[in-house]
Image (spheres, rainbow, N blue to C red):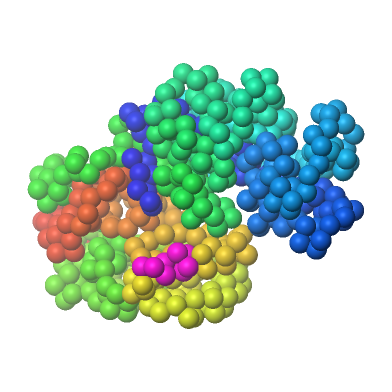
Amino acid sequence: MATPNNIIIRKNDFDAAIFDLDGVVTKTMPTHALAWKKAFDEFLSQHQGNDSAVRPFDIETDYMIYVDGKPRLEGIKSFLQSRKISLPAGDPKEAPGFRSIHALGNLKNGYFLEKVKKDGVEVYQSTLEFIRKLKAQGIKTGIISSSKNCALILDSAGLAEMFEVRVDGVDLIKLNIPGKPAPDMFLEAARQLGAEPSRTVIIEDAVSGVEAAKAGGFGLVIGISRLGNRKDLLQYGAHVVVNDAAEISVAHDDSAARKPAELASAIESFAAIKKSAATKSIVVFLDYDGTLTPIVDTPDKAILSPQTRDVLIELSKKCVVGIISGRDMKNVKTLVGIDSLIYAGSHGFEITGPREFKESSSKGIAFLPALDQAQKVLEEAISQIKGVLVERKKFAIAVHYRLADPADVPEIEHAVDKVNSLHQDLRKAYGKKVFELQPNIDWHKGKALLYLLEALGLDKENVLSLYIGDDVTDEDAFRALENKGIGIVVWDTPFPTAAKYSLKNTDEVRTFLSLLIQICGGPHE
């Protein structure tokens, strides 16, 4: 079902998914934060108190700790208590101002609605796509929000029909139930959806939200870390944390999302693979590190063995063979050293091949200045931590911590998260003992693989595509081949995967490739 870097939602496991609104479905969190800051700063500027009590409201600390995810009045109380300031409750219909908690809340709400009316509501398209996939598999969806403006926001964004159930700030009052971090809102939404908490997924971005979901006993709590708060989300109850909903997969009833025990060896199952390829041409794509070469302490030590190189040369004489790696294209091409192969570096941002086949790296060119700036800040931030290697690729920055003290890993990740928060055009990705900053666009190994198949004229029913990889980044490629090919995972420790078959190590990969040579038809078939 889920590992820290790989999440696959299956209908067999879950009946419903409940989403928080702000920061998960809609990008209203910055709007809320700015409205809170404007209201609180105006209040603090006229309040009599010491410097500590009246210092300006800070979005990164005050908003995230005291306000985010909570009902409006609870957020105000929480923040004011942190500054040792008290205000009377006042009346819900009180005019916006500073006289009471209700007045301050109405002031903030006015600023928020003013901004929404002016600029509209932006939606996370990756979350929408995730919701559509859930609904396509018969998994019910609900939305919760502590905001009384939830219905208005959904209508403004055209999202009202996406959810069977909505529980929001209006319902908190009507049903007389507490808001987050109490679990009541989630439990009420699950009740209305007719789903048991243990068979319901919660998707949240706020600490108070994952805390509430944990208290409610929900089957899977997914935290979305958009502001570098991964550690806090895990600490307060998230089972797993991602940067974006695009990292979450939804398995089809007949898909290749399998439990480890269900995965057969590709070598032992070679007769079945041969049968599948009986009337088809074969094309093979592979990862490099951990697939063709064992995982090593530093990237420069990952050297391809002569035996594996010979097998790749022979295989490339019989069918199309490509390498899709997180390494720079020039680097992986040099390491492999076979001109007859297709090479896709930087997870597909750079592509080249034997026939001057070249998809330019224009997809990532615009991000080079941000990568340059992030590299300088990141190198300085972790320069004093032993065992950390910052590897600058053309279209990514990899932070290797395999040789670092495990106790330093949280500090390393915090440094990466902090730099990432300064560059919203970059995203954080994960690998084996590595954090990576990449261009924040919808592009990964799976999309690179599909692009290559189409560009090579191999996206056809009479072509059997194989992809072999060992890393979480290879799961995108496995999913891309769910209905049109075969994914083969290389692992030493089993985990849930979208691959169809498995291999134990790089030696087995070489053996499997040798078997493929026997069933490939001829020069590029």
Q: Position of residue 397 (x, y in %)?
A: 48, 70
Q: Is residue 291 left or right of residue 196?
A: left
The residue shown at (23%, 69%) is 293
Q: To which quarter of the image does residue 482 belong?
A: top left
Whether 52 is among the magenta residues is no
Q: Is residue 441 left or right of residue 332?
A: right
Q: Nearer the viewer, residue 432 or 67?
A: 67
The residue shown at (62%, 32%) is 179
Q: Nearer the viewer, residue 418 or 26?
A: 418
Secondary structure mainly formed by the magenta segment: helix
User: Can residue 463 be seen by looking at this rendering?
Assistant: no
Q: Is residue 429 above or below residue 207?
A: below
Q: Position of residue 398 (x, y in %)?
A: 44, 70
Q: Position of residue 214 (x, y in %)?
A: 46, 38
Q: Position of residue 402 (x, y in %)?
A: 34, 71
Q: Is residue 282 left or right of residue 186?
A: left
Q: Is the N terminus in the top left, top right, bottom left or bottom right quadrant?
A: top left
Q: Which residues are magenta?
A: 406-413
